[in-house]
Amino acid sequence: MRPCGKNSVCEIETCGMSTASGPARSRARAQIALQLSQLSSDQGSPGMHLHVPRGNQNAAGFYRHIGFTELPATPDELPAPHVLLFGMDL
C-alpha cells in the first residue's frame, strides 16, 4: 500500500487477487481487508473507489463478494470507457 493522507488518492496492491482460488483467494481477501482497515484507521480515509476493466468479470465478482458496490458513473467520470467503478465506505 502506498501511504497517503486524508482525502487523497491511495493505492493498494490487488494485482492477480481476483484470479486466485482456494487458500490463495482467502489470503487475497485477508490482505485487502488489512489494507482497507489501515486506510480507515491509520489514515482517516472515509472510503475507497477502484476501477475494474469491464471485461474482467472475475475481478468484478471478487470485489462485489468482499463488499464493494458497483457505482453508476458517466463516461466523463471514468478514466477510460472500458472500466467499471466500484466503491466501499470504510
Image (cartoon, rainbow, N blue to C red):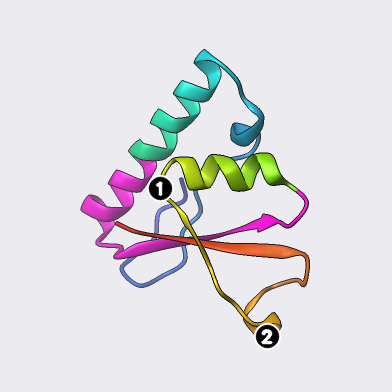
Residue 15 higher or lower than 84, as above or below: above
- Residue visible at 66% across and 30% down in the picture: 19
Left or right position of 24 against 47: right
Judge whether residue 13 can be spotted in this image.
Answer: no
User: Which region shows up in magenta?
Assistant: 35-55
Q: Residues within 10 Å of mark 2 (few under 14, many from 20)?
A: few
- Above or below, 51 relative to 79: above
The residue carrying pointer 1 sits among few (fewer than 14), some (14 to 19) or many (20 or more) residues within 10 Å by Cα, namely: few
Q: Position of residue 5 (x, y in %)?
A: 34, 65
Q: Earlier in the sequence, mark 2 or mark 1?
A: 1
Q: Identify residue type, mark 2.
A: Asp
Name the residue tied to disc 1. 67
Residue at the location (59% across, 33% down)?
A: 17
Question: Residue at point 54% right, 18% down?
Answer: 24
Could you tell me if the residues under marks 2 and 1 are in contact, i.e. CB atoms within 8 Å?
no
- Front residue of 74/13: it is 74
Q: Nearer the viewer, residue 1 or 34?
A: 34
For the C terminus, give its image quadrant.
Answer: bottom left
| Left or right, 15 with reference to 90 | right
Residue 46 image offset from top left, x and y in percent: 29, 65
Q: Secondary structure at mark 1?
A: loop
Residue on which the image places disc 2 = 76
Q: Residue at x 59, y 77 (%)?
A: 73
Relative horizontal placement of residue 25, taking residue 60 as reference (left or right): left
In the rendered structure, which amino acid carries the disc numbered 1? Answer: Gly
